[in-house]
Amino acid sequence: MLKNILIMNDRLVYLNKDFAYSFKNENALIEILKLTNKEMEERAFYDENMVIDMLTIKSICRKYKESNLFLALTFDDSIDPKNDRYKKAVDNLLQATLDYIKETNSEEKLNNPNNLVKKSLTVVDDLMSFLPPKISIIGYDQTGKTNIAKLVLEGKVPEKYIETTGLETYEGKLFDFPLLIWEISDDVGEDLWSKYIKASDALVVVLDSTMENAKETKNMIEKTAKDLPHAELLIVANKQDKEDALIIEQMEKTLGYKVFPFSANKEENAKLIQEQVAKLIELKSEHLDYSTESYVVNRND
C-alpha cells in the first residue's frame, strides 16, 4: 500500500502527498526523509535506489545528481525497485516533476505540493495501484458479509441474498484509493481459512447481533489473534435494526472488544461503513473526518 510520495531538493518540497498514515506523529516521516536526502548527498549516493526499512513501512529513496531532486516512495510492504512497471512509473513521475519545475516560474507555486499532484494524477494513480491494501471480511453464514463488501466498494446493497461459499474477491476504490476485499466463508476449513487471512492488512468481523453468534465469533476472533496478531479489527454488529438484536453493551462484554453497531440492508448507511473501513487501514482523504468516533480495534494497545 502506497503511504506517501515525497519529491524535494535542498530548498523546496515539490510534492509531499500522504495517502495513509505512516506514523502516529504526522511529521515524523518527512523529517526522517529530509535527513536521508542530506545523508545521501553527503555520501554521494546518486542515481541508485536505497530502501529504508522503518518499523512497518519501507521507503524507496533516490537522489538524482543532475537535477538534485530527491524522490521517496513509502509503502507498507516490499516493492522491487527493479520491477519494470515500477521503474516506468517513477521515471514518468520524475519527468512530470521536471516539466512542472521548468514551466512554473513562481517559487511559491513550486512549493505548493497540491499543484504537482494535479499535474501528475495519472502517474500517481499508477503508483497507488501497487500493493493495494487487502481487507478480509470474515464471519459466519448469513451475517451480512456480502452486503458490507458491496456497501464499502459500491455503496449498494445486493438485490437478493448471495450465499458465499469458500472465497469471494472484490476490487474497487474507497475514497479514490484502490482496495482489495476478500470475503471468506467459515466453511473453507481451518487450514485454508488461516492461509486466506494471513496476507490481510486488516480484518472486518461481521456478527448478526445474536448472543449465540457473539459467542461463536469470539472464538473466531481468538483464532485471528494467532494468525494475524498485529492486524487491526473492525467488529461489525450487523442487523441492529431487528427488534430482537442484542444490545451493543452485551456484545462488547461477551467479545471483550469495541463493536460497531450497523445495519447493512440500507444503502444510506454506506458512508458510515466506508468511513470506518477507511480508518481501519488509516487512509488520509479530504472526504474522511477523523474527529468522528472510530470503532477500530488495535489489539496492540
Image (cartoon, rainbow, N blue to C red):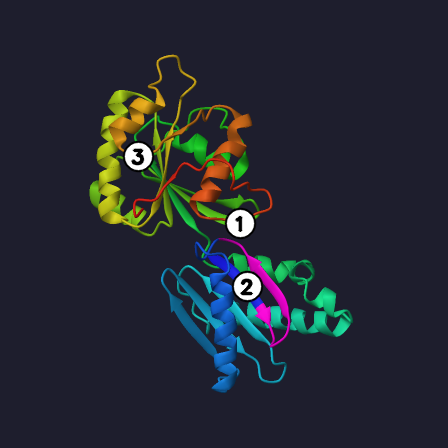
| Among numbered discs 3 and 2, the one appearing first in the sequence | 2
> Magenta region: which residues?
7-20
Image position of 206 (left or right of 193): right
Residue extending farthest to the top is 243
- Numbered disc 3: secondary structure: loop
* CB-based contact (under 8 Å), mark 3 and mark 2: no
- Identify the amino acid type marked 3: Tyr
Q: Is residue 33 above or below residue 115?
A: below
* CB-based contact (under 8 Å), mark 1 and mark 3: no
Task: Give the image location of residue 142, x and y in percent.
Answer: 35, 26
- Identify the amino acid type marked 1: Lys
Residue on which the image places disc 2: 5
Task: Give the image location of residue 8, x and y in percent.
Answer: 60, 71
Task: Give the image location of residue 18, x and y in percent.
Answer: 54, 57
Distance from disc 3 to disc 2, alpha carbons, whole Å, reads 35 Å
Residue on which the image places disc 3: 257
Using the rendered image of the protein, determine whether residue 188 is visible from the camera's viewpoint. Answer: no
Mark toward the viewer: 3 or 2: 3
